[in-house]
Amino acid sequence: MTEAKDNLYKIRHTLAHVLAKAVLEIDPGAKLAIGPPVDDGFYYDFNFSDSFKFGAAELKNVQKRMRKIVQKGFEPKLAEVTYEQAKEMFADQPYKLELIEEFKGGNAPITTYEIAGFTDLCEGPHVSSSDEIDQRAFKLSKIAGAYWRGDEKNTMLTRIYAYAFKTPQELEEYLEMLEEAKKRDHRKIGQEMDLFTFSEFVGGGLPMFTPRGTLMRDLIVESIEEIQKQYGWQKVTIPHITKSDLYKTSGHWDQYKEDLFFVKGKSDTEFVMKPMNCPHHTQIFASSPRSYRELPIRYTETTMVYRDEQAGELLGLSRVRSITQDDGHAFCTEEQIEQEVRNIIHIIKEFYTGLGLLNEGEYWVSLSAMDPDNPDKYMNEGGIFTRAEGILEEIAKSENLPYKRIEGEAAFYGPKLDFQFKDALGREWQLGTVQLDFSQPKRFKLEYTDKDGTRKTPVMIHRAIAGSLERFMSLIIEHFGGNFPTWLAPEQVRIVPVADAHSEYAHRVLAGLQEFNIRASVHEATDSLGKRIRSAKKAKVPYTLVLGDKEQESGSVTAELREGDKLELSLNDFVEKVVQEVKGKA
Amino acid sequence: MTEAKDNLYKIRHTLAHVLAKAVLEIDPGAKLAIGPPVDDGFYYDFNFSDSFKFGAAELKNVQKRMRKIVQKGFEPKLAEVTYEQAKEMFADQPYKLELIEEFKGGNAPITTYEIAGFTDLCEGPHVSSSDEIDQRAFKLSKIAGAYWRGDEKNTMLTRIYAYAFKTPQELEEYLEMLEEAKKRDHRKIGQEMDLFTFSEFVGGGLPMFTPRGTLMRDLIVESIEEIQKQYGWQKVTIPHITKSDLYKTSGHWDQYKEDLFFVKGKSDTEFVMKPMNCPHHTQIFASSPRSYRELPIRYTETTMVYRDEQAGELLGLSRVRSITQDDGHAFCTEEQIEQEVRNIIHIIKEFYTGLGLLNEGEYWVSLSAMDPDNPDKYMNEGGIFTRAEGILEEIAKSENLPYKRIEGEAAFYGPKLDFQFKDALGREWQLGTVQLDFSQPKRFKLEYTDKDGTRKTPVMIHRAIAGSLERFMSLIIEHFGGNFPTWLAPEQVRIVPVADAHSEYAHRVLAGLQEFNIRASVHEATDSLGKRIRSAKKAKVPYTLVLGDKEQESGSVTAELREGDKLELSLNDFVEKVVQEVKGKA
């Protein structure tokens, strides 16, 4: 935790107490639950008196009171109390009493904080004075229901949320970002652009992609396939289920059991839906005796995996139960690690450059390394882990990657590199990844015959370029706000004839575009011109061609851009422009 | 059952009795179970005496004795006996006694047949005389273990199998076909050509496709996609699981429940793996309000469905648990049925012509129609079923399809057309299909707004071109015996430099081929020339280019074909030849 964050944490924590005090001023009978800081502010859960109604007016009132409390000033005061003292102090606060029970007989001291005359059970930390809080830099945002301790068997409480920052400017920027994020919400744009849908018959977290959404998925996948083909990646195909034996052998069973979907048929065999693809891919490697001459062998597949996320955690495409991965696994010798990882980095760089996401200052790479204090935790036979870390760091340097080495972050079976990108709203997304694995090849007894005739275990490299296609789509929808680059737009050109008389010309233009695989359609003059142009812009089509007498006579087109600009040019020049944009992924 | 088949059935049935008699001649203590006719002959199950060993020598001996019995001549004699008489007659045959018990107290008469002095419990029918049996037209084929009544809790018996036909020629042809089928067994060729694999960790019936097998799958799918794109089919994407609600609503639940894989997560929700795709696709249709202007809407997807086949029924790729379908569903008005079905027929015709499977006399089309005696069984609201049948028949005629109208074969929800193809071994495969469906759109309350503003229910058309990709691959592997047409061969050209000195030229040729997307590789001079040429032929590569001094000097290639022919031509001419073959799907 950085120093700045630490301060912000204290500000938010202290404000949660101020909120509780203000609430008690207007409903002295309110029962208090808990009030922690969160990523963008804080919240506090209350059980209001039966006769008390808490609505929008009360929210405003409480906020005003909070400002006054801060204005008046205070210095939080820490105190240690015994279990019995605590019980007495919070005798009329049942939730606090429940929390106090957990300290009974324990060694940890029970602490309270007194803030502006109101004492709460609390571990801290808090600001040392209200001077550290800017009363214009926080805002109560909303109220929502929340079960005590998150358990639906308990009482439903009222949660009051707030945003809180150090300065009013930061709050302002955050509110603007939220406003923009709301406009760009991929669920909203996804529906407007007809990209995907959910059905109550099918279930939550199981998106279905429409023709337009599927086209976008295919364009993304084809774009990756085109790049990776140059580096010898070959497509394979596996089923979505397996006997549980596969994961018991791979070592994933204990780790993933909780999130697995179990599959039961007529037989006693225990099947599960695959939550990852690597163990299946090891079985294709194992299907033939392998020689060093064949290595590296690189299997890639865009396929769905399944994870049983809680219904409450599902969110549009960003959190789903059926996850499409552009997965890949290379099997190679230790000597080949360097070239293999470098090639994967090149694929990631080329793909994200094509999306305009690989800009200086807008991405970084984390290098997950061993914890130097716990070297025994890692598979470092003959120093292979240490050497591999060195290789990754060397590649990060020579490829000019803005990387951070994070010690203790590596899995026991190998170091990795993760690409972290910032979207248009400044939010960070972990996407492309390269992970070394010294464990699975051993567990599945994978082997190749080396030059000298001895049997050796290959190294396995896991990689993903886009990662989860669903999450990736939610990112690019929000990043571009639906204004996709031309190569990725499901519909690239909408042709709008001014009147019926221009319909024939419109269809000639359509044929001319389709000849060059430009995705276009004609919106006939069934509606007013203005309405049709607006409809094209709402669908975020990159080019709307308005064709009237002038265009028809000169064989030209007038292209309206999403941003409002207009271009007048010959059909040939327009085709050339679009073809070049698609080619250059502009 | 045709008259001819009926006779063959009797011959096989009578021969089963003859087999039992011959067995009793060499092991009088053998206990007899049952001996039915089967598709290519008959079998009989025995429990031999403890001291008796039945092996290859005994099989020969029994066959000789059977010939003698037939030669000597007999006339089967039917007799009716009472339950008590039967019990006495078969007192020392425990399996027969068990069968007799089932007649106890029933009204059906118990019948026996006496054949060549040996009496067996039997319902018939049999030949009227041994003159109808040609003693050279049957052959005992093998012995295998089989549980009494197929239940593994019962005694393991010895089953003796035999092939039996009317004439020695028919037997001979059948044995030759079996020999050829063995050579072409897709499991054998699939392994030799490295197309797919199974793993005991993953489980039976769950194939994994290697890079070569995946390439073939992709070529098949792309070939279909290229054709169907012209007819407005659009790709969609759905997850592989769903809440069971989807099938409860579609009406599939009761019918398919037995073969479903049930999926269980943390929640109480009942999920299943999809055994078909149509109900999911209805939900994409239902995701937006639809106008008559948008119809037909055509969704297509190549995706896996899952059916819980019994482990004992699984067989290579021809019977699997994970089935990849090239599925498609069109939603249209009644008026559009004709054009839609016609277009689908065109897709099927074009695709199978490209594989050389659409030859006169080698395919036929079944038209499944209503049972005229049970018209109430069918969804014929306003006569739509009757009209649709007429449309399908009209299309079959005008498209010159060799069709047979099969009454009573239609599903209650609509008539259909199924394409039946004969492979190189004369075996029939049902592949392409078009099925009308008046039921699902109603059950899911699908609607579109018609010209006059009223809400109407669309017709749904199910279609598949290749059907199950796994089954389709098993067919084409066996049909071509692995000698795939050039466009479908995973490796099209193998380049074999005579010696190291020709390696550089070999790589220049490779680059020349790859420029035109020809799938080629170089097999360097690490082994003898003969060995490398044999290896290419074993891998059934269409063209093996042997490059030595002569070729290098003249910039030409010598191409050896799988069939043994040799071609000498310039590299340019060779490229042109291969490119044309791929284009023309030759």
Image (spheres, coloured by chain):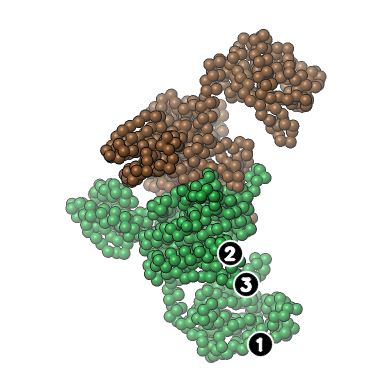
Chain colours: A brown, B green
The amino acid type, in three-letter code, at marker 3 is Leu
In this orientation, does residue B205 appear?
no
Q: Quadrant of residue A345 in the image?
A: top left
**Of callouts 2 and 1, the N-terminal one:** 1
Residue at 55% x, 73% y is B143
Q: Nearer the viewer, residue B556 or A186?
A: A186
Which chain's residue wears label 1? B
- The residue at which mark 2 appears reads as B378
On screen, residue A340 versus residue B36, left or right, reads: left
User: Disc number at residue B157?
Assistant: 3
Q: Position of residue B94 (x, y in %)?
A: 69, 77
Quarter containing the C terminus of chain A:
top left
**Of callouts 3 and 1, the N-terminal one:** 1
**Viewer-nearest of discs 3 and 2:** 2
The amino acid type, in three-letter code, at marker 1 is Ala
- Secondary structure of residue under mark 1: strand
On screen, residue A185 versus residue A48, left or right, reads: left
User: Disc number at residue B79?
Assistant: 1
The Cα atoms of the two marked residues, 3 and 1, are separated by 28 Å
